[in-house]
């Protein structure tokens, strides 16, 4: 990893904040079902079951998360560049690995793309110009909470104002999710990708 990527002690062990566990009461089961894709037939993610500990907050948060993923204006690959890089920068291996399996791989991200989000840079040759600009935006927002005029100009070559606003919100939302993951020490989903699986491929074409 880069020096900017923190080492977060989150593994397969016991969480600091325990997630909800079955059997669920009907209200909780209905709430958790709304977080999962329709008809998935799998146990709700540990993240969702942790957020479910605060049912009122979870119910108010879900529309934002669902809107970013399902109804956004930003092209999915650019959205996922922002999400993958943000989760890597915050050390949220849990969410990064879930997005690798749920979105990154289906969108065609290779090992080299994914490794770059963990330990690479916007200059890595795997990225198209628009993707590199969003990658740089993720880095700038994480480090400085803003972007400079030059990067804003680059983004405007590919995105309109509404899409840039959406990427700002996406960055903020996944910072918030990462904080919950890291503070609660949510155990990794056993099927999700790990940082260590891919980081050696960063920068390769």
Image (cartoon, rainbow, N blue to C red):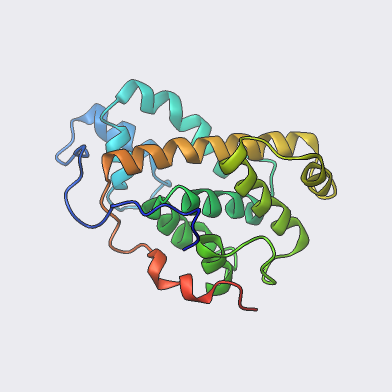
Q: Is residue 71 visible?
A: no
Q: Residue at x 53, y 54 (%)?
A: 84
Establish if 204 lies above or below 136.
below
Query: Residue at the left extreme?
Result: 23
Is 162 rendered above or below residue 104?
A: above
Query: Left or right of 191: which side holds 81?
Result: right
* Left or right of residue 124: residue 65: left
Res 149 quadrant in image = top right
Please name the residue shown 46% across and 63% down the image.
1
Taking the image as shown, residue 151 lies to the left or right of residue 93, namely: right
Residue that lies at the very extreme toward the bottom in this rendered image: 205
Q: Quadrant of residue 32?
A: top left
Q: Residue 181, how many percent across, how many down?
A: 34, 43
Q: Residue at x 55, y 53 (%)?
A: 85
Q: Is residue 113 visible?
A: yes
Which residue is painted at 70% across and 72% down in the image?
Answer: 125
Percent x, y of residue 139: 61, 49
Taking depth in this image into account, of 177 and 70 the one nearest to the observer is: 177
């Amino acid at each position: 990893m880069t020096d900017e990527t923190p080492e977060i002690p989150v593994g397969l062990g016991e969480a600091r904040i325990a997630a909800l566990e079955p059997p669920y009461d009907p209200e909780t089961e209905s709430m958790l079902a709304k977080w999962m894709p329709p008809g998935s037939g799998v146990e709700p993610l540990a993240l969702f079951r942790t957020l479910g500990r605060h049912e009122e907050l979870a119910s108010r948060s879900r529309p934002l998360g669902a809107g970013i993923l399902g109804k956004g204006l930003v092209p999915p690959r650019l959205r996922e560049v922002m999400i993958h890089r943000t989760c890597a920068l915050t050390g949220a291996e849990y969410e990064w690995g879930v997005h690798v399996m749920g979105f990154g791989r289906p969108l065609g991200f290779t090992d080299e793309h994914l490794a770059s989000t963990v330990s690479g840079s916007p200059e890595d040759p795997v990225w198209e110009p628009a993707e590199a600009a969003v990658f740089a935006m993720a880095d700038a927002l994480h480090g400085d909470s803003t972007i400079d005029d030059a990067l804003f100009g680059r983004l405007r070559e590919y995105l309109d104002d509404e899409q840039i606003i959406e990427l700002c919100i996406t960055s903020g939302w996944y910072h918030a999710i990462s904080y919950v993951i890291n503070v609660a020490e949510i155990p990794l989903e056993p099927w999700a990708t790990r940082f260590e699986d891919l980081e050696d491929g960063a920068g390769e074409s």
